[in-house]
Amino acid sequence: MTQSFLNLKRLGVAAALSVAAFTGATSEAFAHGERAQEPFLRMRSVHWYDTEWTKETVAINDYMQVKGKVHFSPMWSWPSVVHKPDNAFLNIATTGPVFVRKGASVNGQFFMNGGSYELGQDYAYEMNLKARIPGTVHIHPMMSIESAGPLAGPGKYVTITGNRDDFKNEVKTLTHQTIDMETYGWANIKFWHILWLSLALAWILYWASKPLFFERYKKLTEGREDELITPTDKLVSIAALVAGIGITIIGGIIAEGNVPIHLPLQTARAHFFPMPKAKAQVEVKLERATYRVPGRAMEMKISVTNGTSSPVRLGEFSTANVRFFNPKVGYMDEISKAYPDYLKAENGLDVSDQSPIAPGETRSIQVTAQDAAWETERLSSLIYDPDSAFGGLLHFYDAEGKRTIVDVGGVLVPQFV
């Protein structure tokens, strides 16, 4: 797959999301546009976990938080056609401007603009949102990466109640002036738009009132090019030029007088330092991975070495926002219980040997992740990609619920019978 082809598909996804944005004012918005993205991109780039929506119903002007952790795949799994996350922006994906992001942090570090992240590392994020437009909307955390476009995390429906006209978005400027961002400068915007559109319309009407095609073509064929532009036309053109430049200069002087202190839009990027990793880890080596098409099941044989001080069991495999749980281990935290149902395969993970892996032990086990989500989330089409490889996270737990997360990925071989 070439970079240009990938960019075309990114453009198609952006167009689909733009169309979906027009539904933002309806009582319930459509969702799941992230399924249009290629499986290899969703499975091998950004992995979201511990995602939490603090409220499922929020009133206009009230706040809610979307928070959790995000893991960037390591270099050996990161798609070669996608730029590294040296220029990425963490945001919210919804159907239109239904929320206002009032604050955001990564690992406790406040940020406004984009920044750089490191492959193979984890980051804790939190976004504080203020409800703006009533309705039921699907809301995702989202990471926009240069050349990859928006990579949406898991989505959940949130209901916003109240009257849209009651919304206020007041902020205090650096000069201690309190303004409402919903109405600030609106009269000025309308004035300048009407002024420039009126001048543009007058310019078009002046030239449209003259013979446009056949008369001008006749003069050209007869060698009378000098008659195409009359002295009046020249005067009108000079007047339009002088008016345009004059209005621009006068407008700048007025703006400078009204707002003597102003700053340009900021483009500086931050560097986000990853979460510290535990020294004792679980190591996983992929021996073989297959996808059984008739059974909608991915099977992988892995070699697991327990480098921690406690026996561990495999409790979950997550990829592309879909979570396959081992029913013999079950939910290990309350956040998982509130995870969107359409992205949960509660009995979707089967492990050939369910006994705990002792500290220092190396064991080869067969893991099967089976659920209809492979089809509904359009992940099974991975087998038709030129680069048929998968990626994901394995979640190991000890008896006390302490978790160790390990990357897993590699070539995926399809089985059609």
Image (cartoon, rainbow, N blue to C red):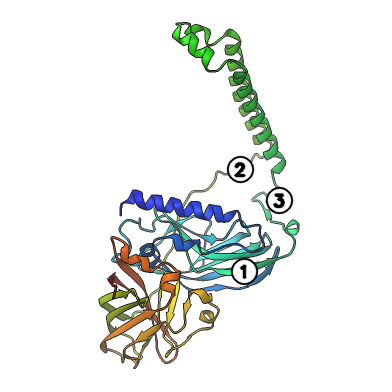
Q: Which residue is mark 2?
A: 262
Mark 3 residue type = Ile
Q: Nearer the viewer, mark 3 or mark 1?
A: 1
Dot 2: element? loop
Residue 358 horizontal side relative to residue 342, left or right: left
Residue 305 location, x and y as percent?
28, 84
Dot 3: element? strand
Q: Nearer the viewer, mark 1 or mark 2?
A: 1
As measured in the structure, the alpha-carbon distance from the residue carrying label 1 to the one carrying label 2 is: 37 Å
Q: Which residue is mark 3?
A: 179
Q: Earlier in the sequence, mark 3 or mark 1?
A: 1
Mark 2 residue type = His
Q: Residue at x 36, y 53 (%)?
A: 6
Pointer 3 local density, CA inside 10 Å: few below 14, some 14–19, many at least 20: some
Q: Earlier in the sequence, mark 2 or mark 3?
A: 3
Q: Which residue is mark 1?
A: 158
